[in-house]
Every structure is written in structure tokens, then in C-alpha cells.
Amino acid sequence: MKWNPNKYAEFADYRGRPYEDLLGQLGGIIPKQIVDLGCGPGDKTSLLAERWPQAQVTGLDSSPEMIAQANGAVQQPNLGFELLDARHWHPRPEIDLLFSNAMLQWLPEHRELLKSWLGDLKAGAYVAIQMPGNFGAASHAVMRQVADSQKWAGRLGGVLRHEDVVGEPQEYQRLLLDAGFQANVWETTYHQVMVGESPILDWVRGTALLPIKATLPEDEYLDFEADYSAAVAEHYPSFTAPDGAKLTNFPFRRIFMVARKQG
Ligand SMILES: C[S@@+](CC[C@H](N)C(=O)[O-])C[C@H]1O[C@@H](n2cnc3c(N)ncnc32)[C@H](O)[C@@H]1O
């Protein structure tokens, strides 16, 4: 039997799968106006437009690069994209599905925003939200430890998000219930198989390290990456597959909620 190391990751759409798992919990509903808040490059938003061809779907994102990419790459008659900061957004009364995948964790004030959006939505409207719930995991805790070390604290104080940037599932359940929603809240830990020499570093380069990259000059950033990579590797031991590939288990917890406004 011949093994191909690239095959390990072939079906592992680890960033995309939670979007589809969230969408999978919306069976039976027929929304007409859908907003995808923090839509990113729009490829996933197109799944909403395909799933509900009778609905108008709007992807909103505060990144001009993301919106440009979405407008360039994704074209469906019932789908549009707009540049917008979620912190200044209010749901229009006709919205009947507010979808948001992997965005609210970027906003420390998301609990207050969520409360206000829940209050604005009409009776019968749905919210469907996913956020990573892994800020206490070693991948993030070690990053904060390195940033707080004597070497880096002077330049990186306050740059990283704290462990409690995303709450526990029961907090969001309470928030939804208090706002008059029927709430379905759950968490899933995805046991991601990572391939390569520095898989945790490779993963966080696209997410958690971005605020550090935005703060430090390039040479210092690379120095920080090296410190982080050495420290985090101890927490994620690799193992060797039958074909010699170096693999690492990277557990990734995510928090989900689907809720419907009563009344
Ligand atoms: C991890 S990506 C998720 C993209 C997409 N939802 C997906 O599941 O593929 C987070 C997105 O949130 C957007 N974002 C961050 N802060 C935002 C804000 N204040 N308002 C709107 N979008 C924001 C980023 O620009 C980025 O596109």
C-alpha cells in the first residue's frame, strides 16, 4: 500500500466544516432575508444562497480585501456583499436569519452587541452562530505567556485577546433565553490531524498571531514566532504515520448556537 502524506489533509476542511455543521442544524426553516456577518471571502456564504435560492443573502465584512474577494469570486443572483463593521450594524426588521461563523470572537464587546441584535430581531427570526471556544487551549495560552514574558511584554502588552474573550456555552444559552429565544447551544471538539513540522504555528499564523504580526516589525515578528513555536511544540507531541509522515493531534473546541425568537 502506498501512502501519500497530502491525503491526510485532503478531507480535512477544518476551517470550513464548522460552517457546514452550523448550517446543518437549520433544517426545515425557510428564511427570506439572510445576513452572514463577518462573511470573509464569501465562499461559504454562497452555501446559504444555494440552500435557500428564494432568499436574499447579504454577506457583511469589515475587511475591504475580503469583500473585494467575495465580489470578485462569488456570483449568485440572490447573493450580495457589503463592507461593514459589525460594531455599527443593526439588523433590519425584515431579517429572518442572522448567521455568523468564526467572527464574534474578534469583538470583545460581542455580548453587548449580541444582546442588542437579539432585541432588534423580529419574532420568528433565527440566529446561528459559531465561535472558537479554545482560548484556554495551549495554542493560545502559550502565546499569551510568551507575549507576557520579560522579552516581549514591553511591546506586546494588551495586544492579545484574553482567555475569556469567548464565554462558556451556558453564558450564551442564558443570554438567548433572557432575550426570549428558544436556544439550542452546544460545543464540539474537532480532533484535527495536522501534517508537517510546525502545524500549530502554521494554523495560528492565519488567526491568533495576526494582532502580533500587525504590531511588530517583520524581523521581531519572526523572532516572536520562533519563541512561540518552540514553546508550543511541547504541548502537541507529534507521531509518525506508517508512511513516515509527521502528524499531530490538534484538538479544537468550538461553541455553537441556533436560536429562534419566540412570540
Ligand atoms: C475567521 S474569518 C471567518 C470568515 C467566514 N465567516 C467563514 O466562516 O469562513 C473572520 C472574519 O470576520 C471579519 N471581521 C472581524 N471583525 C469584524 C467586524 N468588526 N465587523 C465585520 N467583520 C469583521 C474578518 O474580516 C474576517 O473576514
Image (cartoon, rainbow, N blue to C red):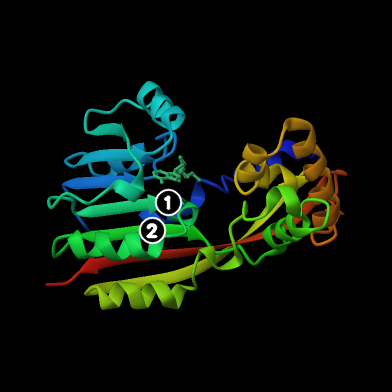
Q: In front: 149, or 116?
A: 149
Q: Is residue 11 above or below residue 170?
A: above
Q: Position of residue 21 (x, y in %)?
A: 44, 56
Which is nearer the eye, 94 or 52?
Answer: 94
Asked which secondary structure carries label 2, the reply is strand
Q: Quadrant of ligand 1?
A: top left
Please tell me which residue is depicted at 84% across the width and 59% down the height of the picture: 237
Residue 200's spot in the image, x, y percent? 73, 50
Q: Are marks 2 and 1 in contact (CB under 8 Å)?
A: yes
Q: Is residue 11 above or below residue 106?
A: above
Residue 103 falls left or right of residue 142: left
Q: Amino acid at mark 2?
A: Ile
Label of residue 32 in the image:
none
Q: Quadrant of the N terminus?
A: top right
Label 1 belongs to which residue? 101
Quarter holding residue 110: bottom left
Direction from residue 93 to residue 167 in the image, left or right: right
Residue at the disc numbered 2: 129
Q: How many marks?
A: 2
Q: Which residue appears at 48% of the width and 56% of the height?
A: 105
**Any atom of ligand 1 within 8 Å of the CB at mark 2?**
no
Q: Residue at x 59, y 63 (%)?
A: 162
Amino acid type shown at disc 1: Asn
Image side of residue 24 versus residue 148, left or right? left
Tell whether circle 1 marks a residue whose Cβ is less than 8 angstroms from ligand 1.
yes
- x then y, percent, for residue 133: 55, 64
Residue at image location 74% in from the left, 31% down from the top: 218
Of 9 and 129, the residue lying toward us: 129
* Residue 138 seen in this snapshot: yes
